[in-house]
Amino acid sequence: MEYSCVGFNDLPDEILMIIFKKMNNFEVLYSLQGVNQRLNKIVQDSPFTSRWTFVKRCSDNFIDVFRYNMMFNRFCSQILPEIHDKIKWLDLESSSMNNVLCAVDYPNLYGLGLYNINEESARSLITDETLSSGIFKNQIRTLFITIDNNDDSYEGMFLWSTRIVNYILNACTSIIYLTLYESLYKNRVRLLFDDEFLPTFRSSTLLKLNIRVQCFDDCLYLLDGRFNQLHTLCVDLVHINHPEEIKNQGDLPNLKCFSLSCYLAISFYDELILPLLYRMSNLEQLGLYIATTMNTTFIDGNHLKRDIINRMSLLNQFTFYIHSFIFISNQLYCPSTENIQRTFIDFLNNNIISYVDYFPEAKQCQCHIYSYPSFTPYYDNITNNFPGGLYKYVRVISLFDEYPFEHEFFLRIQKSFPFVQELIVINYKS
């Protein structure tokens, strides 16, 4: 048998492109830029230069990929000047964002991801005259922010986040899409929705907002007219309590897409959730991911048709995860899984999963209903009856049953929730 040795430079461009696309863009350009003209042409192609990500996710935060000053200096002085006009998106960590943004001009930059932003780094960005009058004011259309809020005091946490938002939105006057999270997934951005603290938290250009906030009041404030062109709102809440006074009850005719998820179970589905949805008369896409207590009956397909689908004539996409539970005096009041599933027979999306669990010791009955594939970030009270499946978007799960969990059950959970970040287990029999 004859053997041949093929050198790296002997490979055709198509093979090199396949190899490079499996690598990190930073590694490709840092390692191969300047080796020869052929490699320069390949690595400066748009797949490797249009978006640059200089952060990576660790267990509970984001870190900078620039491990050494020598790497950072070479990137800013040699690599960026060669590709600056090809860059359309930058993902940057707070410790290096100023230097990268000020290193060269970015004539085609329209998107920014700013990670671990704190008040000091936000202020330094906005007070830079070149950035505030150029990139931020005229170019940035899409902005993704994670706030690194390490203030231990409750009031300080609110003020910190509020000032950061003011800095950013005051500078980005052409923004169309905004995503605002805390760096820690389980935390929420806490804002003071008062014109004294958030005078510039409004926009006539913002079309899409994706945000994690604390409570239902925050959601109502986001819909009080401060974003009068908003057509898409995705909001993730910690809890939904009944406010002392429900304000901002006007119609929302511009809203076309709305997604609501909540970390904790709610008790005011009929009083709060449905009235909010009824304000959205022109809604075309709806995502609803909640757990709720009910008085006498579960939320099933009949409820969804009567209370939501039939009330929204333009709705063409409805994805949901609803976990409802009721307290009962005996098992006769608990409908079967087959009864619940029959209520979805005439749904346009016929891929609906439902199942019922009965807990005799707790005198409680629960029902899960959800469209599949599922987009919910939360999955509550998983029992031994869990039907399986793949849930790529779930980050928090809780396991509960009055019967023991076996080893095989945990293997199923591991396969079904590959990206879970928080696990709660309640089982006194295991």
Image: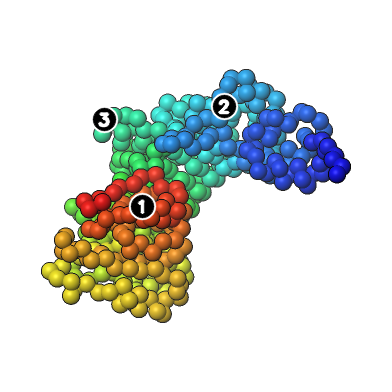
Task: Using residue 164 as the reference point, say whether residue 132 is left or right of it.
Answer: right
Mark 2, secondary structure of its residue:
loop
Q: Quadrant of the N terminus?
A: top right
Q: Residue furthest front?
A: 1
**Residue 209 in sight:** no
In this rendering, the label closer to the viewer, 2 or 1: 1
**Residue 409 in sight:** yes
State the residue position of label 3: 153
Q: Earlier in the sequence, mark 2 or mark 3?
A: 2
Q: Calculate the distance from the C-alpha at mark 2 to the C-alpha at mark 3.
A: 32 Å
- Which numbered dot is residue 333? none
State whether residue 77 is above or below residue 161: above
State the residue position of label 1: 407
State whether residue 74 is above or below residue 157: above
261, 352: nearer the viewer? 352
Residues under numbered marks 2 and 1 in contact, where contact means CB atoms less than 8 Å apart? no
Task: Using residue 13 as the reference point, say whether residue 136 is left or right of it.
Answer: left
In this rendering, the label closer to the viewer, 2 or 3: 2
Q: Residue at x 71, y 43 (%)?
A: 19
Q: Residue 172 placed where, x, y %?
A: 50, 39
- Give the amino acid type for the residue marked by disc 3 in the picture: Ser
Image quadrant of residue 330? bottom left
- Give the amino acid type for the residue marked by disc 2 in the picture: Phe
Q: Residue furthest top?
A: 70
Q: Residue at x 50, y 26 (%)?
A: 95
State whether residue 419 is above or below residue 365: above
Q: Residue 92 placed where, x, y %?
A: 54, 33
State the residue position of label 2: 66
Q: Calculate the distance from the C-alpha at mark 3 to the C-alpha at mark 1.
A: 42 Å
Mark 1, secondary structure of its residue:
helix
- Give the amino acid type for the residue marked by disc 1 in the picture: His
Q: Residue 363 placed where, x, y %?
A: 16, 64
